Amino acid sequence: MKNRILKMEKIVILLSFLFAFWGTNSAKTDSLLIRYSDLNRETINISTCSNFEWRNGYEREIVVSSQNHVDTLKALLDHLQEIEDEYFPVRCKMYIFDSDTIKQKICLNKTSIAFNGKVYANNDSIIDYIDHLMLDYPSSDTRRFFPDIIGADYVEGKDSLYNLLLKEIDKLASSAKFKGSLILGIKCEADKNGKTRNAEVSIIRPQKHTKKELEITNNLRDYIIRNIFWGRDINRGIHDIIYFTIRYR
């Protein structure tokens, strides 16, 4: 424990000299939001940079308002060793804000850290500094924001997505001479640029499916893959699923 404290003091002193040289005490107003879970615990579900909050949850949240502390973290992120871009279970997610605008998202566990669309080997200096911040700042009582997961990635907005798909379902239902109601569950896989790579459309209601209903869902799946494009997200990985439900009639 004593060695760890000495290591943290050395990091803080070194970076203080660097910031004095760079003149970081400027008019910047960056802040940092940290959502943290125990890095030593295993995840129950697949935990990615996009789904970390709503799929697994997190134990603590703090808001770091000091520009110097934010700049210290930025400096620690420099010169990391890039590694292969592959899945790792996210245990902590950080947002760097300029006022209320997200400038950067950073996701990590004990061994890996991802930001700006790349994955790097994590190190003790970053983990120790995050631990230092978690001790220094009280838990936040109010959530600044929470991701909207139901179709929020659609480039023209959630309402436009639902309207577009309902119109297409209406056409498919008319072609199949279907006059009932449907509740559909839709899962989409997209690449970092927003192109739909794959889609799955399942019938939630009614529980017993007719040939007409299956024809509608199969054609809707093809339509989604060809025509639905999502917002670009450099942190989107192969395990990230865009899921939402839609009710017809």
Image: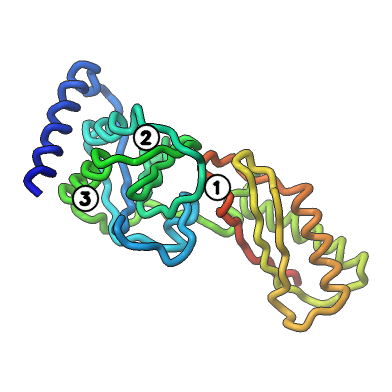
Three-letter code, disc 2? Asp
> Which mark is drawn over residue 137?
none
Q: Nearer the viewer, residue 127 or 95?
A: 127
Q: Compare marks 1 and 2 and give the one earlier in the sequence.
A: 2
Where is residue 247 drawn, in percent x and y? 70, 69
Residue drawn at point x = 30 percent, y = 38 percent: 31
Q: Compare marks 1 and 3 and give the one earlier in the sequence.
A: 3
Please determine whether, in this image, residue 148 is positioned above or below residue 66. below
Estimate the spatial distance between the alpha carbons at disc 1 and disc 2, rounded to whole Å: 25 Å
Residue 249, located in which quarter of the rendered image? bottom right
Three-letter code, disc 1? Gly
Q: Nearer the viewer, residue 241 or 24?
A: 241
Where is residue 174 drawn, in percent x and y? 90, 66
Judge left or right: residue 229 versus residue 43.
Answer: right
Q: Nearer the viewer, residue 11 or 192?
A: 11
Q: Secondary structure at mark 2?
A: strand
> Which mark is drawn over residue 134?
3
Mark 1 or 2: in front is: 1
Judge left or right: residue 79 versus residue 7.
Answer: right
Please determine whether, in this image, residue 209 is positioned above or below residue 165. below
Q: Secondary structure at mark 1?
A: loop
Q: Secondary structure at mark 3?
A: helix
Q: Which residue is mark 1?
A: 237
Judge left or right: residue 35 versus residue 170.
Answer: left
Q: Which residue is mark 2?
A: 98
Q: Compare marks 2 and 3 and give the one earlier in the sequence.
A: 2
Estimate the spatial distance between the alpha carbons at disc 1 and disc 3, rounded to whole Å: 28 Å
Residue drawn at point x = 26 percent, y = 58 percent: 141
Q: Residues within 10 Å of mark 3 (few under 14, many from 20)?
A: some
Q: Residues within 10 Å of mark 2 (few under 14, many from 20)?
A: some
Q: Please report contact status of discs 2 and 3: CB closer than 8 Å, yes or no.
A: no
Residue drawn at point x = 71 percent, y = 78 percent: 205
